[in-house]
Image (cartoon, rainbow, N blue to C red):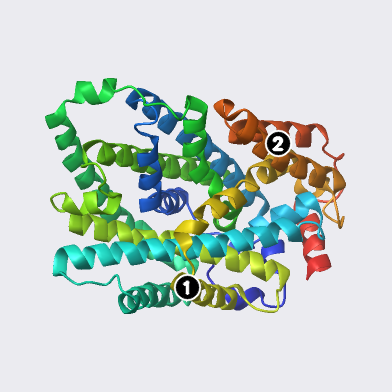
Amino acid sequence: MAHDDSFSSANEALTPLPASQRVFGWHDHASLWFSLGVGLLVMQIGAYLVPAVGTRDAAIAIVLGSLLGAGLLAWTARLGCETGLASAGLMHATYGSAFARLPVLLNIVQLVGWTTFELVIMREGTQAIGQQAFGLTLTGPLGGALTTLLWGAVLLALLAGSMVKLVRRFVSRFGLPLVVLSLVWLTWQFATRLEAKGLEAFWARPGAGGMGMFSALDLVIAMPVSWLPLVADYARHGKRNANGRGGLGSAFTGTWLGYALANIWCYALGVMVVSVAEPGTGLVTALLLAQGGLVALGLILIDELDNAYGDVYSGAVSTHSLLPRWSVRRWGLLIAALCTGLALVLPMHTLEPFLLMLSSVFVPLYGVILGRLGTGRAIASVGNNRRVDLGAALIWIAGIAAYHAAAKWAPQFGSALPTLAATFLLAWLSRPKPASTTTAGGASALAQNRG
């Protein structure tokens, strides 16, 4: 945000952002979410789709899952822009000021985990580039520590500045064109290899089994859904007109198109890479072996920093909502330092399943939030002066249980979409009657209760 310390006397996350600080337009929303949608992790998960499912099924799952998942992000972005509240504020408004601390805390834990994982990915990518380009062996304890501390220091430097300036001056103007050029070059390289091996055979290749269409769809939706607890932290900076309505469409369409395009592109590129790489070749190695792959991978690796930054910034906003005495900037610096330390000592690849399991709690969490807040009713109608909204809390807990039950006993139907639909419907049907207070007034009262 433009001035992290300007709201030090209030709780930024639980107070609607003033109009003077709402500066994001359509291009800013689209650039930010395209950049956040690009990543080596997305490509790696795309590589998991084949040969478990056939090429055509993988393509359907990638396009449909990306459009649906990005649509959920866009819906939440519109809600954040409409209310001016951060993600933590939406959780408080839906679940009550006391109970909401639980999902906020879980969100902080997952963001610390994913930031640490991103630092590990950047470390490994740097090690691979050092070995391929310069013959440097950076995989030992000293090399691993140096590369981790390098990326940690860059992350700390970015967090010392302004989030708004980073998005508008760097991501939109410089970062986005370079990343797009990298993706275009890599796509051209691997598409040429696929053509040489036979595009018809590639397109007609059947699946080897082990994953159904709905499971593949779940895998694709997993990435955009993982950003649900973060999107409002940025969308609240969307411009608004004097009538209070302008900017909602920009937040919605910019987020949707930006993220959907990036998600489709990176998943598809992962499928292409694994389809032409030699058996046993890792994704990073395969990218490096492509002509010009060193430069392209280097630019994507730098873009990976956006993901780590996005996680830390949102983690700082959520932590500030619980402990507002420290500014968002100060919490961001502390979280970045913590994640850098964790990346030095934790075996993050063995913890990835835990992080994915933890992410599953946010599917029903946002099913309830969208059911209560995302259907045109003012935020004050949720009863945001309550300490606990028992109905919303019970629906969320039941949704978590349903998600894991579906994964265990009916994996062929997927988990994310059925759980999201069920929790949304239950939350929508159980909405409280509208209150007489206004959106901003109700949210301000909430901030005072939490301040």
Query: Which image quarter is the C terminus in?
Result: bottom right
Amino acid carrying label 1: it is: Val
Local SS, label 1: helix
Q: Is 169 placed above or below 421 here?
A: below
Q: Residue, x 76% and y 40% (percent of image)?
A: 398
Seen in the image, is 378 located left or right of residue 62? right
Local SS, label 2: helix
Give the residue number, with chain letter if any, for mark 1: 345
- Residue 244 visible, this orientation: no
Residue 382: x percent and y percent?
Answer: 81, 46
Query: Which image quarter is the N terminus in?
Result: bottom right
Q: Residue, x 59% and y 68% (percent of image)?
A: 316
Residue 376: x percent and y percent?
Answer: 71, 37
Residue 293: x percent and y percent?
Answer: 19, 53
Mark 2 nearby-residue class (10 Å; few <14, some 14–19, many ≥20) = many
Q: Residue, x 19% and y 46% (percent of image)?
A: 185
- Mark earlier in primary sequence (1, 2): 1
Tag in front: 1 or 2: 1
Q: Indicate the quadrant where residue 386 lies.
A: bottom right
Q: Indicate the quadrant where residue 143 lies.
A: bottom left
Residue 437: x percent and y percent?
Answer: 84, 51
**Pointers 1 and 2 in contact (C-beta within 8 Å):** no
Residue in the foreground of this view, choosing between 116 and 429: 116
Q: Which mark is residue 231?
A: none
Q: Which mark is residue 402?
A: 2
Distance in Å between CA atoms under marks 1 and 2: 35 Å
Amino acid carrying label 2: it is: Ala
